[in-house]
């Protein structure tokens, strides 16, 4: 634990370094001091008199250079750059600390654009112990949610505050991400390893959002320009086609008039031929009709004579057969009349029989047709 004097010395040294180093967990430092031995209690105490920020910065630069060399050897520095950035990136995965100024700046810039951006925020730690793992998980989560592009942003800070973005896990996660990753980490001069492997690196979260807004607006402008070109070409082509159509119409009128005149002349010639042929055909038809009428008249007289003879013969046959047919019919009627009288129920009733029915009109022929309590109706002769 640092004493009060040591803390004063540390803070003074960090201020002299321009704030480039801030004491956080895991920061390696080189200090100057002296050892004091307190014999009565057997206590050894280190009294720090100065701290060397350049040592810490040097260590960070060495680690950063080594990591970049490994990534370059594996071909990971250019992997993100090879991905194609969508023409209209509207679905944005935002990986940052929720509630931070970086998130507010990024989202406000998109909102002010008036474009239909949809932001999927993933809350991560951006500094301290566990920050690299949190950022890596956040990038993977955003990639799994089918975003058009992923923006990893953070506000400014000391070099040690931004150490998570120089971490190998974060760098490899960005490089291997199937979705284009943009970075907007807020330090002005130095670039982090995350910036080196990203598809595109901007200086601040706001600049990162402005890049997306500019890309969408550029696409919209190109679309509008294309529509204007299409409209201009369409008007020009319509005018050209209209002129061509008018020319075709004039030629069609002239050709049609000439064709109609020629057709009218030919029709007159054909009509005269038809008229002459019709007169000749009518004369021939009248001659044939006269001959045919003479033949038909003779044939009709013969057929009428034969029909008259047949009618007379039939009349004679009918006159001979009619009395016999009538007599037979009278005998058949008398036999039917006798049968009807014999089968007349009234005659059976007159002989003392009766007809018994149930109340609904069913004839009672057997005792099985009725039951106790049924109402019966009996008909007698009178």
Image (spheres, rainbow, N blue to C red):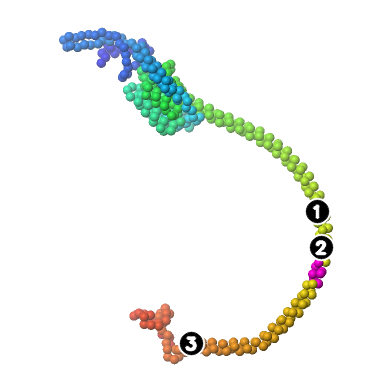
Cα–Cα span, label 1 and label 3: 88 Å
Residue 85 in the figure: left or right of residue 287 = left
Which residue is located at x 56 percent, y 87 percent?
332
Closest to the camera, between mark 3 and mark 2, is 2
What residue is rendered at 76% in x and 43% in y? 255
Q: Is residue 333 above or below residue 69?
A: below
- Residue 376 image offset from top left, x and y in percent: 39, 82
Mark on residue 282? 2
Q: Which mark is residue 284?
A: none
Q: Tell me the element at label 2.
A: helix
Numbered mark located on residue 343 in the image: 3
Image quadrant where residue 203 sits: top left
Label 1 crowd (10 A; few <14 / some 14-19 / many >=20): few
- Check residue 178 for magenta coloring: no
Secondary structure of the residue carrying tag 1 is helix
Mark count: 3
Identify the residue under disc 1. 270
Q: Quadrant of the C terminus?
A: bottom left
Disc 3: CA contacts within 10 A as few (<14), some (14-19) or many (>=20): few
The front one of 115 and 186 is: 186
Q: Residue at x 37, y 21 (%)?
A: 167
Choose the circle earlier in sequence order: 2 or 1: 1
The one nearer the camera, 105 or 259, is 259
Gap in angstroms between the C-alphas marked 2 and 1: 18 Å
* Upstream in sequence: badge 1 or badge 3: 1
Residue visible at 32% across and 14% down in the picture: 29
The residue stretch that appears in magenta = 288-294
Contact, mark 3 vs mark 2 (Cβ under 8 Å): no
Specify whether residue 184 is in view: no
Label 3 residue SS:
helix
Please name the predominant secondary structure of the magenta segment in the image.
helix
């Amino acid at each position: 634990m640092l004493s009060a004097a040591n803390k004063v010395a540390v803070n003074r040294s960090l201020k002299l370094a321009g704030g480039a180093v801030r004491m956080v967990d895991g920061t390696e430092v080189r200090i100057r001091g002296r050892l004091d031995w307190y014999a009565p209690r057997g206590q050894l105490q280190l009294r720090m008199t100065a701290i060397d920020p350049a040592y810490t910065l040097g260590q960070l630069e060495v680690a950063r250079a080594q990591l970049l060399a490994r990534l370059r050897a594996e071909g990971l520095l250019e992997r993100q750059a090879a991905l194609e950035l969508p023409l209209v990136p509207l679905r944005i995965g935002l990986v940052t600390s929720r509630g931070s100024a970086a998130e507010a700046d990024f989202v406000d810039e998109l909102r002010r654009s008036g474009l239909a951006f949809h932001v999927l925020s993933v809350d991560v730690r951006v500094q301290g112990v566990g920050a690299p793992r949190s950022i890596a998980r956040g990038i993977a989560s955003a990639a799994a949610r089918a975003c058009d592009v992923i923006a990893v942003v953070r506000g400014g800070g000391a070099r040690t505050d931004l150490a998570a973005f120089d971490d190998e896990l974060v760098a490899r996660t960005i490089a291997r991400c199937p979705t284009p990753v943009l970075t907007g980490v807020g330090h002005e001069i130095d670039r982090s390893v995350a910036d080196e492997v990203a598809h595109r690196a901007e200086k601040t979260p706001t600049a990162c959002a402005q890049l997306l807004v500019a890309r969408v607006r550029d696409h919209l402008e190109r679309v509008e320009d294309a529509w204007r070109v299409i409209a201009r070409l369409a008007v020009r082509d319509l005018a050209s086609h209209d002129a061509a159509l008018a020319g075709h119409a004039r030629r069609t009128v002239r050709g049609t008039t000439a064709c109609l005149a020629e057709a009218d002349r030919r029709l007159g010639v054909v009509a005269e031929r038809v008229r002459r042929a019709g007169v000749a055909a009518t004369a021939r038809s009248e001659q044939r009709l006269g001959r045919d009428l003479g033949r038909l008249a003779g044939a009709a007289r013969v057929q009428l004579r034969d029909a008259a003879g047949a009618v007379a013969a039939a009349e004679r046959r009918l006159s001979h057969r009619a009395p016999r047919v009538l007599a037979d019919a009278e005998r058949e009627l008398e036999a039917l009349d006798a049968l009807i009288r014999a089968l007349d129920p009234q005659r059976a009733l007159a002989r003392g029989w009766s007809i018994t029915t149930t109340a609904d009109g069913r004839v009672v022929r057997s005792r099985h047709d009725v039951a106790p309590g049924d109402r019966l109706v009996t008909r007698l002769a009178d």
